[in-house]
Image: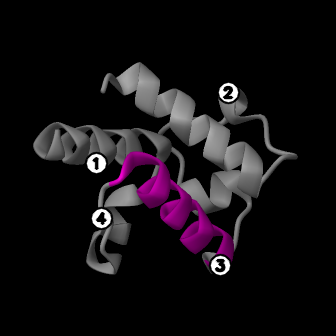
Amino acid sequence: MTRDELKSILASEVRQIAPEIEFEDVDPTDDLRDALEIDSMDFQNLVSALHQRLGIPIPETDYEKLSSIDATLDYLFEETSRSG
């Protein structure tokens, strides 16, 4: 899966969690939770949605690797490349 495909999936899932946020306007290096104005439960829902959509495990110990949009895309790219 390409990074662009992953970005599209992430954007789609973010819109489900935070529909008021314009994903394209978020700085990809900003803290993800702050930029999306989501709490820990919303973040958990986002991680769960990504897990279900991509079929990859995202253990809680890896949550710190999902600190920004860029970091999340790096993580997802690495994990999907490894599993696929």
Please name the residue shown 49% across and 63% down the image: 47
Which span is picked out in magenta?
41-55
Q: Nearer the viewer, mark 4 or mark 2?
A: 4
The numbered mark at residue 24 is 2
Q: Are the two marked residues, 2 and 3, in contact with CB atoms closer than 8 angstroms?
A: no
Q: CA distance from mark 1 to mark 4?
A: 11 Å
Q: CA distance from mark 2 to mark 1?
A: 19 Å
Q: Which residue is mark 3?
A: 41
Side of 37 relative to 20 (left or right): left
Residue 20 picture location, percent across and down: 87, 46
Query: What amino acid is at disc 2?
Result: Glu
Instruction: Considering the whole magenta stretch, tell me its main secondary structure.
Output: helix
Q: Nearer the viewer, mark 2 or mark 1?
A: 1
Compared to 63, does 55 lie above or below? above
Q: Nearer the viewer, mark 4 or mark 3?
A: 4
Please name the residue shown 54% across and 41% down the image: 10
Q: Secondary structure at mark 2?
A: helix
Side of 78 relative to 48 (left or right): left
- The reply to whether the magenta stretch includes residue 77 is no
Q: Which residue is mark 4?
A: 57
* Sequence order check, earlier mark of 4 and 2: 2
Please name the residue shown 61% across and 68% down the image: 45
Q: CA distance from mark 2 to mark 3?
A: 23 Å
Q: Which residue is mark 1?
A: 75
